[in-house]
Every structure is written in C-alpha cells, then in structure tokens.
Image (cartoon, rainbow, N blue to C red):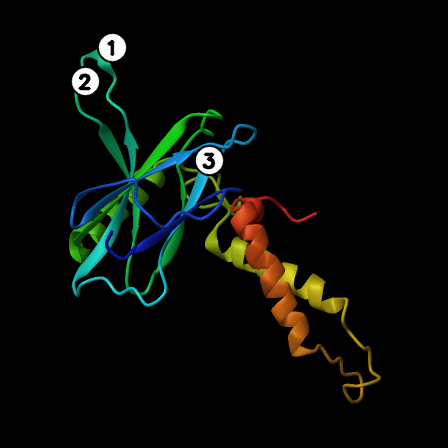
C-alpha cells in the first residue's frame, strides 16, 4: 500500500493513518467505527510528518453519507467540511450530531487545487455567519466563542498551570518568579492530550 498521507483522530479514539479505500490516487476514504460505549462528534485531520502535498494543492475534507435507498438514492452524498494544507497542516472538524455507537462514519479526503479549496472554505464560513448572535456576546458567527476568546482561554489555562510552579520572589530577583522550562513542556503535553480527547473543551467557559 502507498505511504499514508493523512492522520485522523476521532474524539477519544485511536489515530487512523491507513485509508479504508482509495478510489483514486488523490482521493481517500476512512471508515471510522464508533466504540461500542462511546460516540464522537469531532475529528482531527492532519498531514503526517514529512508529508508535503503537490505544489498548488490542498486537502479537501468531506463527510460521506451512504445512499438513502428509501429515497431512491444510488450513490453516496458528501458534505464539505473544510481543508488542510501548507500553512494549516491540521484542523478540527465538527461532523454534526454524535454518531450512533456501533455505526461507522466515513471521512473523505481529496487532494484538489488549493484555490478551489480556499474558495469553498470561505463559502462555508459565509454560510455559518448567517447564524448571527447578539452583539457583545463574544461569539463568532457559528455561535461559538470567537478566536480571541479561545486564545484568552488557552493563555489562562497555561497561566493557571504554570502559576503552581511559581517560586515567589525567592529565585527570580526582586519580586520575580521563576517557572522552569519543563513546567511549560508539561503544560503543553497535558493541553495537547486534552485537545485530542475533548476538542470542544475550549468552547466552554473555564471553571
């Protein structure tokens, strides 16, 4: 089998790197079975280390739905979720309502012209912005926290963790505080692990 290009991490489930099916040299399907006792509603998609897409291309991400034979459909349908590529090697995608335990979710990845993928991403953002929220609520058009709010929460999370390592004024000069580099590395390890297990935790106010 050809070298894998992408990795997929469904919330709370192991990483997938091998596609279930490859309809062409530039399109891949990943069938993700739900854990018997856990459903998921988000997936992380990323380029594997050392992988570079052909110049001028990006990866379009789709949620593929089996045909509804009761409605006369004979071919699967797909919904564009977004894209990744140079400068944005990974992203978290919401696939909708949590999947039913035991069922399979199919994610499609297609290597396409970068300009086309970028245009479709803007179209998706434009559609989301129509769901307006009250001014001053601190949320974006999709109803979730704005990028600024999420950034503030990341910083707050880091500060709260590093504050526990503070040495007061004893080792950092007058009124100074010393935080060892290993403390920051430990915070990043824990923060990354939490993002993998619960990608939506930053969307909730910190307790």
Residue drawn at (52%, 50%) of the image: 196
Q: Across the whole image, how many numbered discs are drawn on residues?
A: 3
In front here: 117 or 101?
A: 101
- The residue singled out by tag 2 in the image is 73
Q: Quadrant of residue 109?
A: top left
Instruction: Look at the numbered discs 3 and 2 and tell me whether their residues touch, using CB distance below 8 Å.
Output: no
SS state under label 1: helix
In front here: 107 or 180?
A: 107
Residue 29 placement, left or right of 45 = left
| Comes first in the chain, label 3 or label 1 | 3
Q: Quadrant of residue 94?
A: top left
Residue found at the far bottom of this picture: 173
Q: Residues within 10 Å of mark 3 (few under 14, many from 20)?
A: some
Q: Position of residue 20 (x, y in %)?
A: 30, 40
| Comes first in the chain, label 3 or label 2 | 3
In the rendered view, tell whether residue 181 sits above or below residue 55.
below
Residue 4 placement, left or right of 145 = left
Q: Residues within 10 Å of mark 1 (few under 14, many from 20)?
A: few
Q: Residues within 10 Å of mark 2 (few under 14, many from 20)?
A: few
SS state under label 2: loop
Compute the Cα span from label 1 to label 2.
Answer: 7 Å
Residue 199 placement, left or right of 28 = right
Say the numbered circle drawn on residue 70.
1
- The residue singled out by tag 3 in the image is 41
In the rendered view, tell whether residue 147 sits above or below residue 137.
below
Q: Position of residue 49 (x, y in %)?
A: 36, 65
Q: Position of residue 35 (x, y in %)?
A: 51, 32
Compute the Cα span from label 3 to label 2.
Answer: 25 Å
SS state under label 3: loop
In the rendered view, tell whether residue 179 sits above or below residue 119.
below
């Amino acid at each position: 089998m050809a070298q894998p290009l992408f990795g997929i991490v469904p919330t709370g489930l192991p990483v997938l790197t091998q596609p279930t099916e490859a309809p062409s040299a530039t399109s891949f399907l990943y069938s993700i079975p739900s854990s018997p006792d856990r459903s998921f509603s988000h997936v992380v998609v990323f380029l594997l280390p050392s992988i570079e897409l052909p110049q001028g291309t990006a990866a379009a991400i789709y949620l593929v739905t089996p045909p509804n034979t009761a409605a006369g459909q004979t071919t699967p349908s797909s919904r564009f979720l977004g894209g990744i590529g140079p400068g944005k090697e990974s992203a978290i995608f919401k696939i909708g309502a949590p999947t039913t335990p035991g069922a399979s979710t199919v994610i499609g990845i297609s290597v396409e012209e970068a300009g086309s993928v970028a245009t479709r991403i803007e179209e998706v953002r434009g559609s989301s912005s129509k769901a307006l929220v009250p001014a001053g609520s601190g949320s974006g058009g999709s109803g979730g926290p704005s990028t600024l709010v999420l950034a503030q929460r990341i910083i707050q999370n880091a500060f709260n963790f590093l504050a526990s390592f503070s040495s007061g004024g004893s080792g950092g000069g007058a009124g100074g505080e010393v935080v060892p580099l290993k403390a920051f590395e430990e915070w990043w390890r824990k923060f990354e692990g939490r993002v993998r297990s619960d990608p939506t935790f930053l969307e909730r106010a910190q307790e």
